[in-house]
Every structure is written in structure tokens, then in C-alpha cells.
Image (cartoon, rainbow, N blue to C red):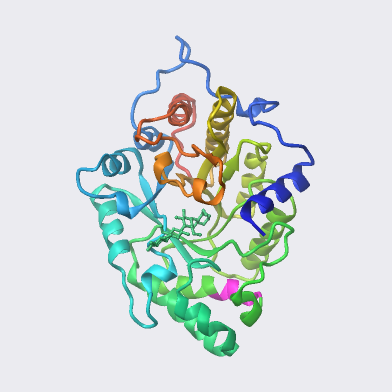
């Protein structure tokens, strides 16, 4: 089933509403008012403003764009305080041939982060996509023990390679279907549901200080999928499995209602977990109308407000910046404009919305309390 259909199913099933633009009926999500004498002028980079409220503001990085002196590199270095490799820590990239690791691109991104005082979100250790061809070819004929040994080696070797350099790891990514059942992957088929707990244990063994996250999309909405993830992480905690947090990818589309994100983040936080928004973008149909752009601004504003309102929310990460580099048009034909910078790397109103939301939070009483 295509991602588009899955997204449509979950939002329709959960919200029970037809397609609406965010801007309609979303009081919580109203974009910040234009600055006046009551409102601090938004000034400063996103990372400067976020640091005032103890929040890390991050982006996915397309490492192909990091050439020295590129405008992309300058924005990545100055606007964000954490980075996520969009692709270069995925299994197909780091182990293209069985037993031969290629950490080069990921190492260069980690070095970039260190040069710029940024933290790294590691993405991702256990997933059903972007697996190396040698693995997908061989997996069906492997025994459970053989496949488990390969998965264990992958998790331990990758986490060990980056030990002390990765702040948060997305240990298991997208293990659920939108109806709340476990996704039918090679991991589930061969290893059963325990592969999830095992992956967290192996990652913890390799780097006990890294924060270990379960990460998924369409769990921003309360409903069958987020309920299933809630039950999973509650059970993992009860069993003493070393899980630290849940990542809410937050890939939104203006044709669906806004998620009830703050309440949802809070219920996971109440389990004693960290939370993070890990892949925020807000796509819409092209060309973008003023109404759609308002809805996109509302999407960015409300998702950042939700994170700011929940003290366990450690980071707010956009899934890339620059509409020319976004994954969206390739997967959703006719849609795009999902990021906070335009095709020419000029900041859009979505950028200003994040800047103003952070500035307002920084000026509010109590906002300097550390996040935890
Ligand atoms: O590297 C090859 C290149 O050698 C080849 O010439 C080219 C031809 O198509 O493909 C390149 O690989 C592409 C890769 O991105 C790197 O650019 C793949 O085709 C393409 O499918 C892949 O897409 C990535 C996608 O994950 C794969 O599922 C997107 O960039 C990336 O943004 C996206 O990220 C995911 C998160 O990891 C998990 N959550 C959802 C999110 C969006 O789908």
C-alpha cells in the first residue's frame, strides 16, 4: 500500500473527518500574530532561540549538499543545533557488501556536527527499508538464528562505531502498521516481536550513554497506531528494556487535520520517556495557494508549540530544509513545498513561524527551565 493511502487511512479513521486544511478550525494552531509592541521581535537563528528554552532544533542532512562554501552548508551550520543523517547511517549505506563497512559519509557528517557544536540523532538501526541487497536476497532462506546474529552484529557494530558521538539513536523505525498491528517485515517474520526488545538491549550494550528511541510516523494522532506504540513502550519499560524515548516523525499534509500532538506527547512522557519530533515537514499540493501556506505555517507552529509545552520533548527536528532537496515530490506526485526554505534556500513564512514561536517561548516566564 502506498504511503499516501496509509496516511489517508489513518487520519480518516482516527479523526473521522473529511479532508480539511489546517487553517480551518485549528484554534490551537493559529500562527503567531504579527509582531507589535506586545510581542518581542523575532531575531536570531533558530538554534540561538531554541537554546534559550533548552531545546535542540535539528534538521535531517542530505550529505551530498554539504560541499564547502555551499549556502546549504552555511544554513545547516548556523540554524540548527542537532543533525540527523537523512540516509547515510542506514544499513544499505554503511554495509553495502556483507562484512565490509563504509562509514565515510556518516563520519564526515559527525565531524561536521562536532565542528559546529551540534548533537547527532542516529537514524536508523532496524528498519524494513534501505536494507542492503545482499541481506534482502539472503534473508528468506536464513534460519532465525542466522538472521538474529546478523541483526545483532549490525546493531552492535554501528552503535560501537559511533559510541560517544550519537546523542539519540532511532533504534527501531516504523515497526507498526496504521491499524496498530506489527508490520510484516523480515524481522517480524523470522524473529517474532522480540526483535524490538533485543535491538534496544544490543544498542544499550554497545553505548550505554546514548538515548535509545522508537521512531514512527502517523503516531502524532491518538488512535490505533499510537495506542499500539504506547502499549509497546509501556511493556518494554515494564520489562526493564533500555528504551529512553519515542520519536514522532510528524510528516504532515495540509489536506488532513492537525494531530492532537501535545496530549499525545504528554501521555508518552508520563510513562517516564523522553519524546522528540524527529522528521517534521508539512507538504501540500502544488502550486501553493495562500490558504495552503497558512495551513503549512499552522502545521509548523502547532507542532513546535506542542514540543515546547511538554518538558520531556528534547528536540524538534525538521526533515531537511530547502524544498529542492525534500523527499516529498518523489513520493507524493503533485505535492511538495514541505520544508521551511524555498527552492533557492530562502527562508519561507514557515521558517519565520518557527523563529517567532521560539522567540515567544523564550520570553515567557519559566521557559528557561531545563528540559528533561
Ligand atoms: O543513493 C542512490 C543513488 O545511488 C541512486 O542513483 C539514486 C537513484 O534513484 O537513488 C539513491 O538512493 C535514494 C536515497 O534516498 C538517497 O538519495 C533512494 O532512491 C531513495 O528512495 C531514498 O529516499 C529516502 C527514503 O527515506 C527511503 O525510504 C529519502 O531520501 C529519505 O528522506 C527518506 O527518509 C525517511 C526516513 O528515513 C524514515 N521516515 C520517513 C522518511 C521519508 O520517507
Name the residue nearer the viewer: 43 or 23. Answer: 23
Q: Main secondary structure of the magenta part?
A: helix
Asked if the stretch drawn in magenta spans residue 194, the answer is yes
Closer to the camera, 338 or 198? 338
Q: Is residue 12 visible?
A: yes
Q: Residue at x 40, y 35 (%)?
A: 341
- Locate residue 174, reporting x and y percent: 59, 61
Left or right: 323 in relation to 115 = right
Front one among 218 and 141 = 141
Q: Is 278 within the magenta?
A: no
Q: Residue at x 40, y 22 (%)?
A: 42
Residue 18 place in picture, x, y as percent? 76, 37
For the N terminus, the quadrant is bottom right
Give the extent of the magenta segment.
Answer: 193-198
Q: Is residue 114 left or right of residue 320?
A: left
Give the percent coordinates (x, y) of residue 330.
Answer: 50, 50
Residue 267 in the image: above or below residue 287: below
The mark total stands at 0
- Residue 47 sits in which quadrant? top left
Q: Is residue 55 above or below residue 89?
A: above
- Which residue is the extreme one toward the left? 69
- Spot occupied by residue 354 in the image (x, y as percentages of width and height): 46, 31
Q: Is residue 247 above or below residue 305?
A: below
If the picture is divided into quarters, which one holds ligand 1? Answer: bottom left
Residue at screen point 29% across, 52% down = 113
Residue 207 makes an appearance in the image: no
Q: Residue furthest right?
A: 16
Q: Is residue 159 left or right of residue 117?
A: right
Amino acid at each position: 500500500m502506498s504511503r499516501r493511502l496509509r496516511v489517508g487511512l489513518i487520519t480518516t479513521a482516527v479523526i473521522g473527518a473529511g479532508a480539511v486544511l489546517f487553517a480551518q478550525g485549528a484554534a490551537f494552531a493559529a500562527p503567531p500574530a504579527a509582531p507589535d509592541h506586545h510581542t518581542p521581535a523575532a531575531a536570531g537563528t533558530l538554534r540561538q532561540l531554541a537554546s534559550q528554552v533548552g531545546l535542540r532544533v535539528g534538521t535531517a542532512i542530505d550529505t551530498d549538499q554539504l560541499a564547502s562554501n555551499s549556502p546549504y552548508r552555511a544554513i545547516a551550520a548556523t540554524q540548527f543545533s542537532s543533525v540527523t543523517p537523512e540516509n547515510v547511517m542506514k544499513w544499505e549505506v554503511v554495509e553495502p557488501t556483507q562484512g565490509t563497512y563504509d562509514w565515510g559519509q556518516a563520519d564526515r557528517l559527525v565531524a561536521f556536527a562536532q565542528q559546529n557544536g551540534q548533537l547527532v540523532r542516529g537514524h536508523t538501526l532496524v528498519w524494513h527499508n534501505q536494507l542492503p541487497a545482499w541481506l534482502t536476497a539472503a534473508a528468506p532462506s536464513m534460519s532465525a538464528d542466522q538472521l538474529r546474529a546478523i541483526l545483532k552484529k549490525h546493531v552492535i557494530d554501528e552503535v560501537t562505531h559511533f559510541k560517544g558521538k550519537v546523542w539519540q539513536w532511532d533504534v527501531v523505525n516504523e515497526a507498526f502498521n496504521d491499524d496498530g498491528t506489527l508490520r510484516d517485515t523480515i524481522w517480524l517474520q523470522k524473529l517474532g516481536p522480540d526483535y524490538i526488545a533485543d535491538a534496544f538491549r544490543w544498542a544499550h550494550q554497545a553505548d550505554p550513554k546514548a538515548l535509545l528511541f522508537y521512531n514512527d510516523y502517523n503516531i502524532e494522532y491518538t488512535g490505533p497506531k499510537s495506542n499500539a506504540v504506547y502499549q509497546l513502550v509501556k511493556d518494554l519499560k515494564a520489562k526493564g528494556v533500555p528504551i529512553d524515548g519515542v520519536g514522532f516523525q510528524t510528516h504532515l499534509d495540509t489536506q488532513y487535520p492537525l494531530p492532537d500532538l501535545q496530549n499525545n506527547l504528554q501521555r508518552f512522557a508520563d510513562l517516564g520517556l523522553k519524546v522528540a519530533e524527529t522528521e517534521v515537514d508539512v507538504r501540500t499540493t502544488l502550486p501553493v495557494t495562500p490558504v495552503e501556506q497558512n495551513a503549512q505555517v499552522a502545521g509548523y507552529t502547532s507542532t513546535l508549540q506542542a514540543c515546547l509545552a511538554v518538558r520531556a520533548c528534547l528536540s524538534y527536528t525538521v526533515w531537511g530544509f530547502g524544498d529542492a532537496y525534500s523527499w516529498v515530490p518523489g513520493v507524493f506526485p503533485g505535492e511538495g513545498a514541505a520544508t521551511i526554505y524555498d527552492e533557492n534556500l530562502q527562508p519561507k513564512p514557515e521558517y519565520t513561524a518557527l523563529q517567532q514561536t521560539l522567540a515567544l517561548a523564550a520570553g515567557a516566564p519559566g521557559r528557561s527551565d531545563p528540559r528533561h
